[in-house]
Image (tube, rainbow, N blue to C red):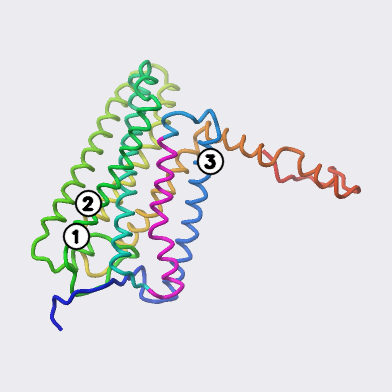
Amino acid sequence: MPNDTRISGFILMGFSAAPELQTVWGLFLLVMYLAVIVSNLLLITLITLDLKLQTPMYFFLKNLSLMDIFFISVPIPNFFINSITHNNSISILGCALQLFLMTSFASGDVFVLTAMSYDRYVAICCPLHYEAIMSSGNCVLMVGASWATGILFGALYTAGTFSMPFCGSIVIPQFFCDVPSLLRISCSDTLVVIYISLGIGFCLGLFCIICVVLSYFYIFSTVLKIPSTKGQTKAFATCLPHLTVFSVFIATAYFIYLKPPSHTASIADSLFSVLYTVLSPALNPVVYSLRNTDVKCALRNLQKILCPRGSLHLRIRSTCPWYSASHFTTTFCNY
């Protein structure tokens, strides 16, 4: 058979050739996926319902959580189904769609994170002009541009990748379609289109990184001039969560998209694939809620609405006359 025989699909190798281990990995990632979905949906709900969270920072955070939900929903459910059915094949159309969606949402994440760094810069360095600069119209414009640019880059990136013919091995040493693996099995003599796409993506990423670095340079310069330690701590507390999420996402994305193609998946490849798809979306609700008083207060308010104090005792007493609250020392609504 000639070497340039065209192929109609790929095999996603995943984490192991053993079906049993593949199923274990599928269940593990499913649990992580559900935890990420629930935590991000909870964060979106809190931001939407609580009036104290109707600020530009939380508006960006809500869109970031929404993008993270869409992003992680592309590879994980597909891998779980493949792991329990022991069918690792994916069509070219399915691979192209997966690449398009993941690239679009990942790019949108970077642009929203960049907008969030600008929001922190204006809040700390130009507080008197904050409301004028970060108006609702400007925030919607920045978020809309982030979504649109992400989708546009995803379309360009996917079109450039799948404009090439594929031949040879159909095995992709990942649990999702990644560009380095697709470049390895390409039989095209010229990769001009994909290199142009990679160049555009590299320039956009570099632009976002420069914007974030400059924003934090001015932020840290301003914060260090604050005379009180308490003021410095409060200012840093609003910036460090964003800086953590941005750094982790950029580092893992860099490894996934710019690493040299390999024929077999190493432990490092598998580790960074999980970090890229799961850790970044999981970090978002965690780092913004653990030390965030506003989010904790919004969660307590939602808890009071859904489970008001004493409602359980009244409900049981109405159906059980013999019931006495003194017989019980615990309640499901304890806060």
Q: CA distance from mark 3 to mark 1?
A: 41 Å
Say which quarter of the image contains residue 99: bottom left
Which residue occupies the foreground of this view, 158 or 201? Answer: 158
User: Residue at image x 26%, y 52%?
Assistant: 155
> Against 244, is 156 above or below?
below
Tell me if label 1 and label 2 are in contact, CB under 8 Å. no
Q: Amino acid at mark 3?
A: Thr
Element at badge 3? helix
> Against 307, is 253 above or below?
below
Residue 81 sits inside the magenta stretch: yes
Q: Amino acid at mark 1?
A: Pro
Q: Which residues are magenta?
A: 60-87
The circle drawn on residue 45 is: 3
User: Which percent across, then down, holds residue 190?
Assistant: 9, 61
Element at badge 1? loop
Tell me if label 3 and label 1 are in contact, CB under 8 Å. no
User: Which percent across, then down, holds residue 14?
Assistant: 35, 68
Q: CA distance from mark 3 to mark 2?
A: 33 Å
Which callout, 1 or 2, points to the residue nearer the camera?
A: 2
Q: CA distance from mark 1 to mark 2?
A: 21 Å
Which numbered disc flags the more N-terminal residue, 1 or 2?
2
User: Residue at image x 14%, y 54%?
Assistant: 195
Which numbered disc flags the more N-terminal residue, 3 or 2?
3
Which residue, given by chain and number where applicable, does mark 1 sit on? 260
Which residue, given by chain and number where applicable, does mark 2 sit on? 156
